């Protein structure tokens, strides 16, 4: 199972919006509405930000939103804030009954 | 409050075996899959496998098949991950993590609760 494909890095200024893509195949992202997104700050455990493509767990800011089209899922962060600077990972359930993560995207808030 | 508390850092020699524990509290252990995720220094997350604590059934990622064993002890609400034939590339932080929704819900695809991570260093 190959890792999902994410851009290595994205950046944006405070207040702007950014979008991170996550490309898989019809055996994972495209085949199921079970894409999750995680935020990870240095030295910390990942934190669930989006699940089931577009749902937000309780306590996660509505500035975070998710979507999917075909084999590509996307995470959009609007109104960028300094504390959003972190690594972001997507994940999907797969047809092999396994899970697969993306390679990760480093978000820099300029 | 859901808590996953992992055992401490380990230093192992190449070829050795490491076993990490993950003790849970705040939820019914047998209702949720327990996943294990590897993160090498400066690298991304890699899913290793999971155990269904209810019946002990496991699913492993192809990359780790044959070297990893994940188990669950329902008497102590503790999950374990054992990785054998260690090599330098196995130097990483290992996380246990569980779904936010129970298996019986049919919607158990998000990994929402994570342990603090355990650093395993493989060095001669």
Image (tube, coloured by chain):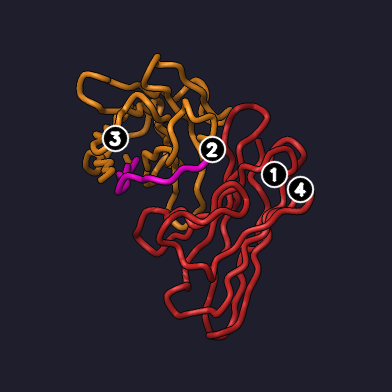
Chain colours: A red, B orange
Tag shown at residue A81: none
Marks 3 & 1 on one chain: no
Measure the C-alpha gap from mark 2 to mark 3: 17 Å
Judge by depth and name the residue closer to the eye, B1 or A42: B1
Near-viewer residue (A94 or B44):
A94
Q: Label 1's element?
A: loop
Label for residue A29? 1
Residue B73 placement, left or right of A105? left
Answer with mark 4 or mark 1, whichever residue precedes in sequence: 1
In the rendered image, residues at marks 4 and 3 fall on the same chain: no
- Where is residue A21? Give x, y as percent: 68, 60
Q: Residues within 10 Å of mark 3 (few under 14, many from 20)?
A: few
Considering only vertical position in the picture, is A79 above or below A36? below
Q: At 53% across and 76% down in the image, what residue appears?
A: A108
Q: Is residue B121 left or right of residue B108?
A: left
Crowd band around label 1 with a 10 angstrom C-alpha radius: few (<14), some (14–19), many (20+): many
Question: Residue A26 placed where, x, y %?
Answer: 77, 39
Q: Does the segment drawn in magenta span residue A11? A: no
Taking the spot 40% from the left edge, 61% from the top edge, the residue there is: A59
């Amino acid at each position: 199972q190959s890792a999902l494909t994410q851009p290595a890095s994205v950046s944006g200024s405070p207040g702007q919006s950014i979008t991170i893509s996550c490309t898989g195949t019809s055996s994972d992202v495209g085949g199921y509405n079970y894409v999750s997104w995680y935020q990870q700050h240095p030295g910390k455990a990942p934190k669930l930000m989006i699940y089931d493509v577009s749902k937000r767990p309780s306590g996660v800011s509505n500035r975070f939103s998710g979507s999917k089209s075909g084999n590509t899922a996307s995470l959009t962060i609007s109104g960028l804030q300094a504390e959003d600077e972190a690594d972001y990972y997507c994940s999907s359930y797969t047809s092999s009954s396994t899970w697969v993560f993306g390679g990760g995207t480093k978000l820099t808030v300029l | 409050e859901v808590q996953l508390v992992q055992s401490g850092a380990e230093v192992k020699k190449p070829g050795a075996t490491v076993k990490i524990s993950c003790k849970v509290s705040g939820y019914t252990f047998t209702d949720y899959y327990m996943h294990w995720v590897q993160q090498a220094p400066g690298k991304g997350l890699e899913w290793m496998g999971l155990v269904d604590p209810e019946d002990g059934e496991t699913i492993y990622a192809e990359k780790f098949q044959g070297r990893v064993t994940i188990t669950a002890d329902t008497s102590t609400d503790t999950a374990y991950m054992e990785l054998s034939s260690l090599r330098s590339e196995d130097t990483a932080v290992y996380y246990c993590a569980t779904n936010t929704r129970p298996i019986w819900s049919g919607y158990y695809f998000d990994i929402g609760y994570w342990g603090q991570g355990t650093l395993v260093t493989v060095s001669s």
